[in-house]
Image (cartoon, rainbow, N blue to C red):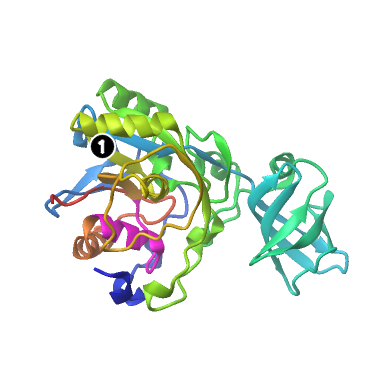
Amino acid sequence: MSVSNLRLSDFDYELPAELIAQTPARERGGSRLLHLDTAGGLHDRLFADLPGLLRPGDLLVFNDTRVIKARLTGRKASGGKIEVLVERILEPGRALAHVRASKSPAAGTILRLADAFDATVLGRQGELFDLRFPAPVLDLLDAHGATPLPPYIAHAPDAQDDARYQTVYARAPGAVAAPTAGLHFDDGMLARLRQAGIEQAFVTLHVGAGTFQPVRVDNLADHVMHSEWYTVPQATAEAAARARAGGGRVIAVGTTSVRALESAAQAGGAPRAARGDTRLFITPGYRFRAVDALVTNFHLPQSTLLMLISALAGMEPIRRAYAHAVAARYRFFSYGDAMFIESPRP
């Protein structure tokens, strides 16, 4: 299917508000798991069942990005309130950020943040503001920032969010949203998978705030995907090649891992060591080169992530899966339940 034939309404569904998870499950691995198999069959399982759905020689690929405390509040010198969401750190003392204010601050404006330090507006890059900080950005965010919870989570972030809106294997700071499929994995599950002969590898994709931005065009061919920075290490490319050569599957943990692997596979037809910005927009009709299956959460209506999983499994199987998940009262979005999606047999 050509993207020119796809409409935003093709990816809509009705979701009762009470199914949007506001807090994580009591235990990381305590969620439910909806399994969509290669024949399109649906199976209600628990996340703890995942190792039994995998085979020795399969490779799980995780995104090891770390969520930073990217949200700051403050005031302009004029007294007007502002909210800053750091999107990307350019160098130790400089970052690109979203700035919400009654009037957009011009170059040279001083922003008093967290009533603790001043940042200077250097200019703009598209929708983002280029800010100069008086000390390393990460240090200031750790001391004064707040965990940037998604807009559909109603409560202010607390200590539980600081811990649980972060994967146990998070390593590389830079994300402003969690790679949420990974939130279900704890150290015990990772050990069980290793003992079962399931290989593990890592990519890094710094999830940006654009992941929550709505698609504003009806014809998807007109959509411009937001940019995110990714890295696929040589060791991960080699692990993927070994898995495929041995008859195993490459299973992405999260849509961000999919985008990193597929971005690294665009030129050669298989993942290779690569790094850079990606604007890869995966919609039905896309030919997957790197990924055979996916562990993922449930995604927002009309979102690019829902389009991605529809490309992997097929639009009609995903429609059926989501209708089933709503009827069966699964918990949705970042703190919600998970899916294991196996791509259909060719």
Quadrant where the N terminus lies?
bottom left
Residue farthest along the top direction in this orientation: 195
Query: Residue at point 35% right, 67% down?
Result: 15
Q: Residue at x 83, y 48 (%)?
A: 116
Q: How many labels, in total?
A: 1
**In-image side of 29 versus 324 (left or right):** right
Question: What stretch of residues is rendered in magenta?
Answer: 297-312
Can you say whether 345 is above or below 189 in the image? below
Give the residue at the far bottom of this rendering. 218
Q: Is residue 320 left or right of residue 210?
A: left
Quadrant position of residue 281: bottom left
Helix, strand or loop at label 1? It is: helix
Residue 28, can we see it? Answer: no
Find residue 226 and report its horizontal and vertical position in percent.
51, 61
Q: Circle 1 sits on which residue? A: 50
Residue 51, image x, y percentages = 25, 32
Q: Is residue 48 above or below residue 195?
A: below
- Say if 268 sits above or below 246 in the image: below
| Residue at point 88%, 64% (across, down) | 77
Nearer to the camera, 234 or 219 = 234
Residue 79 left/right relative to 140: right
Q: Position of residue 24 (x, y in %)?
A: 44, 46
Query: Residue 307 colored magenta?
Result: yes
Residue located farthest toward the front when viewing the structure as drawn: 268
Residue 50 screen position, x and y as percent = 26, 37
Residue closer to the observer: 232 or 328: 232
Residue type at numbered disc 1: Leu
